[in-house]
C-alpha cells in the first residue's frame, strides 16, 4: 500500500534504517561513557540518553505492529522517532566536548553550584566549542524533565584557560530564568507598540496601511511590524537583564569581561537581522548607570575602592574613567535612532529598564548571590595572588577561615590583571600563570565548601 510516495516494503526498510542509526548511536554512547567528566552531570546525561535509547527501541517495535493495519500512521510515527533521535545525536557533540580534558574543569563545580541556585530544576553541562562567544542552549520552561532538563553551556575553546573571562557564564546562566518575566512584560509592551508602529507603516509604506495578500509585510502588515519591534525589544531586554544580573553576582568583573569581549568585535555593532543584540557601548553604559551608578551598586563599588591599596585601586579607577569616557560617546545611539523601528523598540527598553533592574536585583539577592556580600575577602585574596599562592580559603587571625567566594576570587583575578598591566608585567607566561592560579583557587574553594557542608557543624566566621 503506497504511503507518502513509498511502498510498504520501503516503509519496513525505514525501520531498518532507524535500527542502524540507533545501533550507531549506542556505540557512540558507549565510547563517551568510557571518558572522564569533571562532575556527575555528564554521566547523568549519558544515563538519560541510554534510557531514551531503550525506550525508542520499544516504541519502534510497537510501531512495527501498525505497519500492516495502519501504514500511514506508522510512517508518521517512524518519522517522529527519527526526529527525536536527531535531536539526541546533537548531544553527542556536547558530551564529547564536556570531557575533563576539554573544559576548564577547575571551574566546573563553581558553575554548577551557581546553576543550582539559579535553575534548581535544570542540570547544566559545560562544554568547550569552536565558537568565539559564551552561549547556552536550553528549553524555555521552568518545569522540565528527562533530556530537556539538561542545559548546554558553551565556553569558547580558545578561552578555556582564560579564567577571568569565565565570569560571563553568569550572564548565560541567567537566560533560562527570564522567559516568564519577559512574557509578562511583553503584554503591556505590545499594547504600547501599536500606535508608533502604525506611524512607521504609514511613513514607509502608505499603500500597505490596509491588510492585503500582495505586500512584503504579509496579510497583516501592522501585526508583522509590531512583532518585529517586539523581537528587537525582547532581545535588548534579555541581554541587558543578563548583564545587570551578572553584575549583581560578579560585580565590576562583569564590566571588565564584557569590555574585553567587545574589544575583539566592536563597541558599535549594528542591530540587524541575525544580530539583534544591543551594541556593546549601549550595554556597558547601562551597566555603569544601573548597576554601579545608583544604589546599592554605587555604595558597593565605593566600599571596594576603600578596601584596596593604591596598587590596585588606581588601575581600577583608570579603567572606570576610561570606560565612562567611552560610553559618553553617542555612536551607538545614532545606530539605534537611525532606524525608526529600532528606535521604537528602544523607547520601550527605556521605559522598562528600571523595573527590570529592580527585578533581577531582587531575584538574586533573595538567593544570596551578590558580590557585595564578600568584598572583605578581596584584599586577602590579592595578597595571596601577589605571592603566587592559591587563595581558595580566607584565613583569619584566630586561625580559622572560610572558603573564598566565587565572585571575590574572580574580582581579585581581574584586579590583579589590571595591576600587572599597569606595572608592565605583560607576557603570555605571566598571564597563563595568573589564570591557572585563579582556576586552582576556584577548585580549592569548592573543595573547602564541600568539606564545610559535610563535616563542620559549628558556624564559620562570616562578614
Image (cartoon, rainbow, N blue to C red):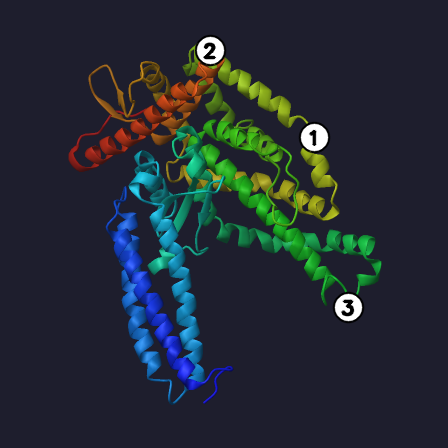
Mark yes or no: residue 145 visible.
no
Q: Quadrant of the C terminus?
A: top left
75 horizontally vs 112: left or right: right
- Do labels 3 and 2 touch, CB within 8 Å? no
Image coordinates for residue 75, horizontal then vertical, percent = 43, 79
- The residue carrying mark 2 is 423
x 52%, y 29%: residue: 260
Q: Earlier in the sequence, mark 2 or mark 1?
A: 1
The CA span between labels 3 and 1 is 39 Å
Residue 366 seen in the current view: yes
The residue at which mark 3 appears reads as: 214
Q: Where is residue 123 shown, x and y percent of the image?
A: 34, 50
| Image spot of residue 95 (x, y percent) | 34, 50
Cα gap from disc 3 to disc 2, whole angstroms: 66 Å
Along the viewing direction, whichever of 400 and 444 lies nearer the viewer: 444
Badges 2 and 1: C-beta atoms under 8 Å apart? Answer: no
Q: Mark 1 — residue? A: 330
Q: Quadrant of residue 352?
A: top right
Residue density around tag 1, few if under 14, some if 14–19, many if 20 or more, within 10 Å: few
Task: Find the residue positioned furthest to the right.
Answer: 207
* Secondary structure beneath label 3: loop
Q: CA distance from mark 2 to mark 1?
A: 32 Å
SS type, badge 2: loop
Between 263 and 16, the one nearer to me in the picture:
16
Which badge, 3 or 1, comes first in the chain's sequence? 3
Which of label 2 and label 1 is nearer to you? Answer: 2
211 with respect to 147 (left or right): right
Q: What is the total number of numbered labels drawn onto the structure image?
A: 3
Amino acid at each position: 500500500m503506497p504511503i507518502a510516495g513509498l511502498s510498504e516494503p520501503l516503509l519496513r526498510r525505514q525501520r531498518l534504517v532507524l535500527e542502524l542509526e540507533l545501533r550507531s548511536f549506542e556505540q557512540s554512547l558507549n565510547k563517551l561513557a568510557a571518558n572522564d567528566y569533571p562532575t556527575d552531570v555528564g554521566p547523568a546525561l549519558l544515563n538519560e540518553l541510554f534510557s531514551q535509547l531503550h525506550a525508542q527501541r520499544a516504541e519502534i517495535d510497537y510501531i512495527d505492529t501498525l505497519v500492516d493495519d495502519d501504514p500511514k500512521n506508522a510512517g508518521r510515527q517512524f518519522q517522529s522517532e527519527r526526529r527525536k533521535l536527531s535531536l539526541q545525536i546533537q548531544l553527542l557533540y556536547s558530551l564529547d566536548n564536556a570531557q575533563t580534558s576539554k573544559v576548564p574543569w577547575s571551574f566546573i563545580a563553581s558553575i554548577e553550584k551557581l546553576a543550582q541556585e539559579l535553575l534548581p530544576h535544570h542540570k547544566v553541562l559545560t562544554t568547550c566549542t569552536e565558537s568565539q562567544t559564551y552561549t547556552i542552549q536550553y528549553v524555555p520552561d521552568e518545569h522540565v524533565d528527562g533530556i530537556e532538563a539538561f542545559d548546554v553551556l558553551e565556553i569558547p575553546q580558545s578561552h578555556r584557560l582564560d579564567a577571568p573571562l569565565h565570569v560571563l557564564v553568569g550572564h548565560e546562566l541567567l537566560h533560562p530564568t527570564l522567559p516568564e518575566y519577559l512574557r509578562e512584560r511583553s503584554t503591556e509592551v505590545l499594547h504600547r507598540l501599536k500606535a508608533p508602529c502604525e506611524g512607521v507603516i504609514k511613513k514607509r509604506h502608505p499603500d500597505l496601511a490596509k491588510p492585503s495578500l500582495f505586500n512584503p509585510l504579509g496579510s497583516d502588515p501592522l501585526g508583522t511590524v509590531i512583532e518585529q519591534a517586539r523581537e528587537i525589544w525582547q532581545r535588548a531586554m534579555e541581554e541587558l537583564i543578563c548583564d545587570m544580573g551578572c553584575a549583581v553576582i560578579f560585580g565590576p568583573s562583569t564590566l571588565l569581561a564584557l569590555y574585553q569581549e567587545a574589544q575583539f568585535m566592536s563597541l558599535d555593532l549594528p542591530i540587524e537581522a541575525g544580530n539583534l543584540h544591543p551594541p556593546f557601548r549601549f550595554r556597558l553604559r547601562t551597566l555603569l548607570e544601573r548597576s554601579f551608578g545608583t544604589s546599592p551598586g554605587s555604595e558597593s563599588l565605593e566600599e571596594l575602592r576603600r578596601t584596596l591599596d593604591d596598587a590596585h585601586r588606581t588601575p581600577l579607577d583608570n579603567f572606570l574613567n576610561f570606560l565612562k569616557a567611552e560610553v559618553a560617546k553617542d555612536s551607538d545611539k545614532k545606530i539605534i535612532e537611525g532606524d525608526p523601528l529600532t528606535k521604537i523598540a528602544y523607547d520601550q527598553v527605556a521605559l522598562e529598564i528600571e523595573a527590570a533592574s529592580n527585578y533581577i536585583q531582587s531575584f538574586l539577592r533573595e538567593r544570596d548571590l551578590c558580590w557585595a556580600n564578600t568584598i572583605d575577602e578581596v584584599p586577602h585574596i590579592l595578597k595571596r595572588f601577589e605571592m603566587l599562592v592559591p587563595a581558595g580559603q580566607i584565613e583569619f587571625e584566630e586561625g580559622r577561615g572560610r572558603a573564598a567566594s566565587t565572585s571575590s576570587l574572580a574580582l581579585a583575578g581581574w584586579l590583579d590583571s589590571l595591576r600587572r598591566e599597569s606595572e608592565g608585567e605583560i607576557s603570555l607566561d605571566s598571564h597563563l600563570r595568573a589564570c591557572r592560579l585563579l582556576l586552582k583557587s576556584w577548585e580549592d574553594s569548592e573543595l573547602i565548601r564541600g568539606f564545610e557542608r559535610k563535616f563542620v557543624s559549628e558556624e564559620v566566621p562570616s562578614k
